[in-house]
Amino acid sequence: MENLELEQVEKKVEEELSAVEDMNALQQTKANYLGKKGIIAQMMSNLKDLSIEARKELGMKSNLLKQSLERKFEEHRKFLEDKMIQKKLENERIDVTLPGVRFKCGTIHPLQKTIMDLEDLYIGMGYTVAEGPEIETDENCFEKLNLPKGHPARDMQDTFYIGPEWLLRSQTSPIQVRTMLAKEGKPIKIICPGKVYRRDADDATHSHQFMQCEGLVLGKDITMADLKGALLEMAKMMFGEDRKIRLRPSFFPFTEPSVEVDVSCAKCGGSGCAMCKNTGWIEILGAGMVNNNVLRMCGYDPNEIQGYAFGIGVERVTMLKYHIDDIRNFYINDVRFLNQFKEVK
Ligand code: DAH
């Protein structure tokens, strides 16, 4: 092997490297020259046939060549690596002047909004939120609320039975029953929002599934004046600060006395218009003082503790608040309807 040959090897490597564009090719080329069976290894093994002098000289030169090649391969590796990083940076460059992508964003459903507003208001007044199952026992939904089997008031809530003792709840009042039984005679201050079901034919004002938000407050010396205060605050929050309410006698089996509650018409302010059918008042809910029978059946002594309950129809107040004329709008999920509530705070 001559000096010339060694120089040629170095040149050849340089030439080949100039065409190497990626790491795999680099590995391959490096193996061809510096690998165990590569060209340099072969050169070294040929040395054994030479004289000692020539072996010494060529051995030294081959070693130098080997080191020089190693440097060249390393330099080229660095060069390729830099190029790759450069390319990556180029590709991933962010153009901050591009307009952003707008995400389509939904909105809180108006019924959910009403429930959140009611929860905010009543939690602020010291109530807690109680929930219960939508499949209830006849016992909790009717019996313990003073509606024994055969009671005519059951007809108004004729509902979906799953068996003789199980049904989809027709009112949220069974949550009151559950809470009373769990509290074993202690004071209570809750609201109970939730879905209810009745065997109603759907039309503009009826739905077989709708929502209620009930309230129950039991304690010493709770009176109807407290009830009136709790409902007046609600009417003001939902329909405006200058709203008034009035209580009219009514009947519910679970309250005695019972009342229907009207709010002064927000549209005409009470002077009479089409919305309030010229009466100046709009009915919004039922309420009353909890019936002694209910208290006793649920483990309370009416001589010690009494209180009030109310039941807000969530659809009803939402329809009045936002002037919605068909209850079915809440459930058919038409985005054109729902989009209108994006601005509602
Ligand atoms: N549960 C009644 C209904 O569905 C509404 C109601 C009225 C609830 C008076 C009450 C109440 O808690 O005191 O028609």
Image: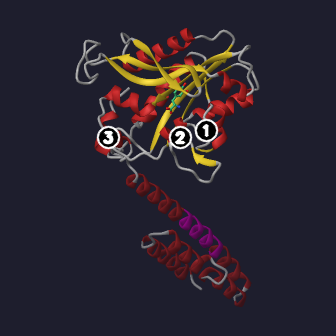
Mark 3 or mark 1: which is in front? Answer: 1
Is disc 2 in contact with disc 1, using a CB cutoff of under 8 Å?
yes
* Residue, disc 2: 170
Q: Classify mark 2 as within 8 Å of ligand 1 or not, answering yes or no.
A: yes
In the displayed structure, 118 sits above or below 3; it is above
Distance from disc 3 to disc 1, alpha carbons, whole Å, reads: 26 Å
Where residue 210 sits, quadrant-wise, is top left
Distance from disc 2 to disc 1, alpha carbons, whole Å, reads: 7 Å
Where residue 88 sits, quadrant-wise, is bottom left
* Residue, disc 3: 204
**Segment tinted magenta in the rendering:** 62-74
For disc 3, the neighbor class at 10 Å (few under 14, some 14 to 19, many from 20) is few
Secondary structure under tag 2 reads: loop
Quarter of the image with the N terminus in it: bottom right
In the orientation shown, which residue stands out farthest toward the left? 274
Secondary structure under tag 3 reads: loop
Q: Residue 141 got which mark?
A: 1
Q: Is residue 314 magenta?
A: no
Residue found at x 54% / y 14%: 227
Q: Is residue 208 visible?
A: yes
Q: Amino acid at mark 1?
A: Cys
In the displayed structure, 163 sits above or below 97; it is below
Where residue 177 sits in the image (x, y, percent)? 66, 32
Where residue 260 sits in the image (x, y, percent)? 45, 21
Q: Residue 207 got which mark?
A: none
Q: Amino acid at mark 2?
A: Ser
Q: Is residue 98 visible?
A: no
Residue found at x 66% / y 27%: 294
> Does residue 36 appear left or right of residue 327 in this picture?
right
Q: Nearer the viewer, residue 159 or 175?
A: 159
Does label 2 or label 1 sit earlier along the sequence?
1
